[in-house]
Image (cartoon, rainbow, N blue to C red):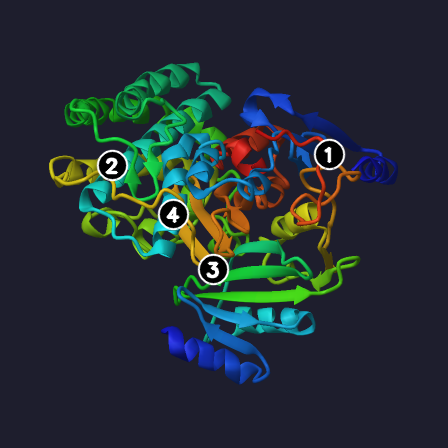
Amino acid sequence: MDKIPLAEFIKSLDSDLEIKEGKQFTEVTVPPSKLHSLASQLRENDETLFDFLDCITGVDYGHDLGVIYHLYSTKFRHTVVLRTRTADREHPQFDSVSDIWEAANLHEREAFDLLGIKFASHPDLRRLFLNSSWGFPLRKDYVDNDIITW
Amino acid sequence: MEEKAKDIITDEQQEYIINIGPQHPSTHGVMRLVVSLKGEFVLNVEPHIGYIHRGIEKMCESLTYPQIIHLTDRMDYLSAHINNEAVCLAVEKALEVDIPDRVKVIRTLMSELTRIQSHELFWASYGMDLGGQTCYFYGLRDREMVLDIFEETTGGRMIVSYNCPGGVMYDLHPNFRKRVKEFIKHFRKVLPEYDDILTNNVIFHGRTVGIGPLPLKEAIAYGITGPSGRASGFSCDVRKHEPYSAYDRVKFNEVLFTEGDSYHRYLARVEEMRESMDIIEQLIDNIPEGPYAVKMKPVIKLPEGEYYQRVETARGELGVFIISDGNKLPYRVKFRTPNFANLSVLNHLVKGFKIADLIAIFGSLDFVIPDIDR
């Protein structure tokens, strides 16, 4: 399946989604409430079959916190980028996709560890690299008092 | 974790928890495995990571693109050159720079040499993990020749930092072609010895055949790439599916097996060394003349946007994801490292096997811990 039908197909799943043809991939912006259902549709549907979760990237946009998913299909060899964001910095929460792709388990723990983004119904959401008293270093408002400048 | 461990002990008295690591020879670095056992059988393995977390993604946000390249060596130090290449390719793709043919061929040659030396070290240490001390000396002896080639051209033996945006740092050393040919000739001769010592060894078969099998579906769901994924039949070679540098002009086979056990994960790496030698032989006499780098602006600023680049390191797919806001510093850099993704399958693989098999399975996944922690 080439690029144009993929975007059209995702549009047919939900016409409210914002779909853009990026330089590299088809990019879909999803509200957090629809993320899990769209992800599982993309995974299960025979037309898209995104069976390989490439990576999950947590991003701090300044006001908002967001998560970017790179999905890949081992059958059709195409990629789609899902992005979602929330303005709630105190309790940012998205639905976990670890029940769809097992690979998401560690990636989501990493996003929680470094950005403090919570994933609802994640089986084992604990800090990964840092201890629990540490802040969230990849947030833009993180202050490091011990930083050495050169 | 402490709470959980307590729960397990009080719930079922027969379970026994032991710690492997963080300082343990068979973890090849600082990683702690909390293993719960019933008799000799593994019930659960909990990897604890972060002992060598340096915050590379955070550091990248305050460094320029040419500086970031030097941090990537320190992730998977056995695939240092390939990591460098990934960042360079992402930057070059963003700036839409045309790279001279000579650079593409040099990068491919260096990548394949890197892959060979990485798999040699895997072979050496995997043999030693399973009790074959000789392997370690054979493997390191031959790996030394590749490191000498690196040292002559790049100045570094492992941490090469040879790439820069637009090309490579310096031209190839005049001896490069001669020494690579010597190495290939030597290595073709000794690789059958590797097979005699380990691949066809009955004791080694007993330790690895049928141990920790990973079916194709699970390999894809857990995101297992590289030789470990290809041993399960997951065709995931980025060099084949999204060729970069000079991989579109060479012929090589993607090594695929279907069994997916420890033995075939090992075998995939040994076969890949042969494929890498084929690639090197196709290119070594055809290095095009020309500049070894294109001149870039002194301050590299990527246009606003997101850039994703996949490359095939010795351990699997490395993804470099750069979000740029148009500045000379990146807004966010994410490294999708192969070892981090491969780690997620460990607990699933070892369940029900004996604790000695844990070492065989752990070794066959070929982890480099700094690549997990970043």
Query: Furthest residue to the front?
Result: B298
Q: Which kind of residue does numbered mark 1 sit on? A: Asn
Residue B354 location, quadrant = top right
Please rate how many residues cluster around mark 1, counting C-alpha atoms within 10 Å: few if below 14, some from 14 to 19, many from 20.
few
- Is B186 situated above or below B258? above
Determine if marks 2 and 4 fall on one subunit. Answer: yes
Tell me the residue that label 1 is attached to. A145
> What residue is disc 2 on?
B109
Q: Which residue is mark 4?
A: B311
Query: Residue at horizontal 34%, vertical 38%?
Result: B164
Q: Which mark is residue A136?
A: none
Label 1 in the same subunit as label 2: no
Q: Name the amino acid, label 2.
A: Leu
First-in-chain label (3 vs 4) = 3
Residue beneath disc 3:
B304
Q: Chain of mark 3?
A: B
Instruction: Find the distance from the CA under tag 3 to the CA under tag 2.
Output: 32 Å
Mark toward the start of the polypeptide (3 vs 2) = 2
